């Protein structure tokens, strides 16, 4: 009995249509064309190797069942990979020719599994060698303007290594994570900027995960999924911000999985950011998470006091804002969450100073910070400890640091040393040098003295409790 390949495939489509979603059917089955049917072997034409791989991974079971139902248990399948030339408005097709060992038609001799899946990658669109791609990078986000500190040292060092040799280090993918506003976007864009400088011929692209999802949705809606895939598979350095946004989006994850695989296997560099490390991400497929762990996962932490000081100094210098050391220290002590809040405080200070023709004083800074920061919890420093202790005992900082044996000053100085050791990260030597120019042994003796008094003197203990409350406000 002669069976027409068109009628066989149309019958298969009727069954498949009832078993997949309308969007999946339009995306993955409508573009397929039946080519021929000979000796129980049905040949179907697909637009790319990626398309073939996706069908094999996601829909081979339903395809196998329907073809066997129409042709019989001896049914076999061949794929003919024919890629559209998206550079032509009329969208003519050009068949990709492979050598005999990598022929475009892949025979399936065992059920519906191909005996040679190693087809040549047809990912370069004919006639297009270099794409005129806008990398979407902010020139202000350079390595030069990124302030290094203990909170980001590993991340910055790894980023510079990636920038010098994209795709050529063990940091592929480079996965950067941390809370919002800590400089992740700045650092990954700095990599893109350096790569474009050193390798102008490379295709670099930065985008958010949300933008990627929007583009993918549009491609599916307009039946341009192949153009979408071809475009991303030509990128040399792909930077995607906030990949946690992919959570729960299975179709987007499937597509990104294949793009990731192609780029990684081709030696291209991938850079990803998230608010959490890969092990803590929810709603992402395990196969994606495992790939995120292939390279280096580095974190950016909340900037410490010294880093915040350095950031404020750099940004105030760049923006031409004149501030005293006292004002800078005040802002750094009160705005502790992230860099964005520091920038916001500076902008507000500059605006108030300019509009009201006021000098940026400590009082003006306090007024602005009070409005910007809901919690005025401070990053406690040795200077701040001295300030609070002096206020409590009605002393001046100069009195606290002067050389004297007066009991009330000596005890206040010892209390300041005690709290500096317990509430700050400063070393004993640093504490001593800041409080009267003492050595570390003096600080250690002061701490022991205060600890002993805490255990034996109730009034002294009550005073220390009050001071600590003031320090922690």
Image: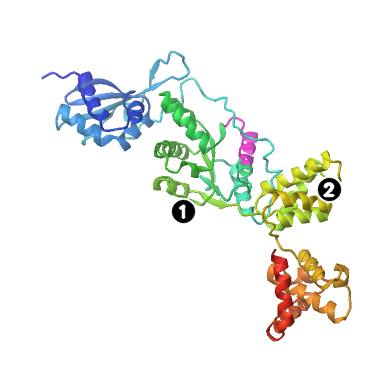
Q: In this view, does 136 lie to the left or right of 410?
A: left
Q: Is 289 in front, or is 92?
A: 289
Compared to residue 186, the image places residue 232 above or below, namely above
Q: Residue 134 at x, y = what percent?
A: 59, 28
Q: How many numbered marks, from 0 up?
A: 2
Q: From the viewer's perspective, is the residue at label 1 or at label 2 nearer?
A: 2
Contact flag, marks 1 and 2 (Cβ < 8 Å): no
193 vs 218, left or right, is right
Q: In this view, does 184 lie above or below 213?
A: below
Image coordinates for residue 239, horizontal then vertical, percent: 55, 39
- Check residue 149 for magenta coloring: no
Range of the magenta residues? 189-202
Mark number displayed over residue 279: 1
Report whether residue 114 is seen. Answer: no
On screen, residue 228 versus residue 204, left or right, reads left
Determine the image quadrant of residue 14: top left
Query: Along the line of sight, which residue is nearer the eye, 200 or 228?
Result: 228
Q: Report the disc number at residue 360.
A: 2
Q: In which quarter of the image is residue 123?
A: top left
Q: Can residue 385 be seen in this view?
A: yes
Q: Earlier in the sequence, mark 1 or mark 2?
A: 1
């Amino acid at each position: 009995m002669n069976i027409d390949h068109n009628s066989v495939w149309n019958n298969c489509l009727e069954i498949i249509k009832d078993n997949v979603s309308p969007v999946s059917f339009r995306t993955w089955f409508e573009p397929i064309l039946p080519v021929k049917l000979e000796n129980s072997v049905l040949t179907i034409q697909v637009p790319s190797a990626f398309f073939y791989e996706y069908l094999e991974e996601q829909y081979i079971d339903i395809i196998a069942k329907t073809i066997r139902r129409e042709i019989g248990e001896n049914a076999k399948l061949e794929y003919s990979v024919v890629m559209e030339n998206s550079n032509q408005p009329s969208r003519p097709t050009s068949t990709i020719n492979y050598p005999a060992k990598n022929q475009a038609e892949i025979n399936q001799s065992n059920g519906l599994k191909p005996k040679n899946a190693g087809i040549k990658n047809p990912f370069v669109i004919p006639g297009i060698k270099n794409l005129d791609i806008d990398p979407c990078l902010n020139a202000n986000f350079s390595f030069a303007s990124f302030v290094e500190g203990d909170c980001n040292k590993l991340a910055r060092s790894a980023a510079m290594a990636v920038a010098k040799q994209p795709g050529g280090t063990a940091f592929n993918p480079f996965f950067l994570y941390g809370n919002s506003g800590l400089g992740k976007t700045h650092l990954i864009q700095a990599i893109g900027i350096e790569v474009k400088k050193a390798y102008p011929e490379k295709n670099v692209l930065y985008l958010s995960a949300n933008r990627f999802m929007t583009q993918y949705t549009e491609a599916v809606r307009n039946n341009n999924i192949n153009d979408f895939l071809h475009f991303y598979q030509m990128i040399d350095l792909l930077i995607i911000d906030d990949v946690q946004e992919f959570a729960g989006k299975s179709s987007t994850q499937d597509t990104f999985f294949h793009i990731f695989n192609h780029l990684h296997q081709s030696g291209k560099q991938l850079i990803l950011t998230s608010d959490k490390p890969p092990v803590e991400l929810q709603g992402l497929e395990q196969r994606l998470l495992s790939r995120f762990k292939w390279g280096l996962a580095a974190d950016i932490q909340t900037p410490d006091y010294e880093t915040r000081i350095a950031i404020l100094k750099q940004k105030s210098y760049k923006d031409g804002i004149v501030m005293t050391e006292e004002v800078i220290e005040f802002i750094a002590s009160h705005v502790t969450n992230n860099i964005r809040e520091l920038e916001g405080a500076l902008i507000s200070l500059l605006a108030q100073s300019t509009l009201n023709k006021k000098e940026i004083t400590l009082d003006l800074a306090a007024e602005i910070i009070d409005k910007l920061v809901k919690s005025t919890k401070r990053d406690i420093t040795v200077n701040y400890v001295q300030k609070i202790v002096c206020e409590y005992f009605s002393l001046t900082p100069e009195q606290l640091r002067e050389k004297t044996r007066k009991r009330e000053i000596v005890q206040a100085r010892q209390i300041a040393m005690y709290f500096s050791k317990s509430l700050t990260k400063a070393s004993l030597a640093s504490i001593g040098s800041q409080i009267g120019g003492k050595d570390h042994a003096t600080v250690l003796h002061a701490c022991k003295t205060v600890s002993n008094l805490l255990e034996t003197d109730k009034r002294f203990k009550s005073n220390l409790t009050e001071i600590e409350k003031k320090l922690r406000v």
